[in-house]
Image: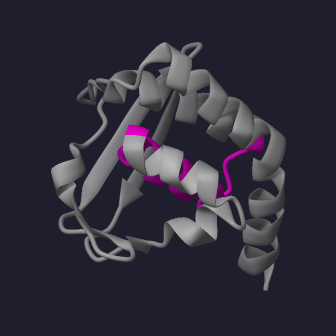
Amino acid sequence: MKKIELAEMIPPASAFQKDDTWLATEKTRYCVELKSQWVIAEVPKGFSVEFSAITYDFPLIKKWINQRTIVAAIFHHVLYIEGYERKIADAAFLRAMKLEGVRVYHRYPLYWSARLFGGFKYLAVLKHNMA
């Protein structure tokens, strides 16, 4: 059997089109490694994300995300949708921001906002997936 080599990769922001929502203009694949475990998500062409759905009623966080990271935030959202354990999804978000080039002093506040407030979104996604 042929061994598949994985490499950490985050697609460029150009893979998404921005209006009020972010739309995947092509099928994209995210791969990050966390402690010898691969976290992989595939986003189909046409997948859309409204950042107001991700950040709820935190317009300051939404503005900060839009100025710092888009691709890692979409990856994080997709991991929630795919049912990854929340702690793993949040750690993958932190790693993806590093790969995307987000500065460390922006990465950690965004990560901790996901850890502190992301549970509401995570539970909403789980509830939606069960319905």
Residue farthest to the bottom, as pictured: 131
What is the x, y in percent for residue 66?
42, 51
What is the x, y in percent for residue 31?
38, 35
Residue 2, quarter of the rendered image:
top left
Q: Residue at x 82, y 52 (%)?
A: 119
Q: Main secondary structure of the magenta part?
A: helix
Looking at the image, residue 2 lies above or below residue 128: above
Q: Is residue 97 among what the camera can see? A: yes
In magenta segment, residue 84? yes
User: Between 44 and 93, which is closer to the camera in this rendering?
Assistant: 93
Judged left or right of residue 61, residue 64 is: left
Judged left or right of residue 59, residue 30 is: left
Q: Quadrant of the N terminus?
A: top left
Which stretch did the figure color magenta? 68-86
User: Between 44 and 64, which is closer to the camera in this rendering?
Assistant: 64
Q: Residue at x 44, y 42 (%)?
A: 72
User: Between 107 and 61, which is closer to the camera in this rendering?
Assistant: 61
Looking at the image, residue 81 lies above or below residue 47: above
What is the x, y in percent for residue 14?
16, 53
> Count of labels shown?
0
Looking at the image, what colour scheme do you see?
one colour
Q: Residue at x 25, y 71 (%)?
A: 45
Looking at the image, residue 42 lies above or below residue 99: below
Q: Residue at x 80, y 48 (%)?
A: 117
In magenta segment, residue 7? no
Q: Quadrant of the C terminus?
A: bottom right
Q: Is residue 69 among what the camera can see? A: no
Looking at the image, residue 31 lies above or below residue 29: above
What is the x, y in percent for residue 109?
65, 28
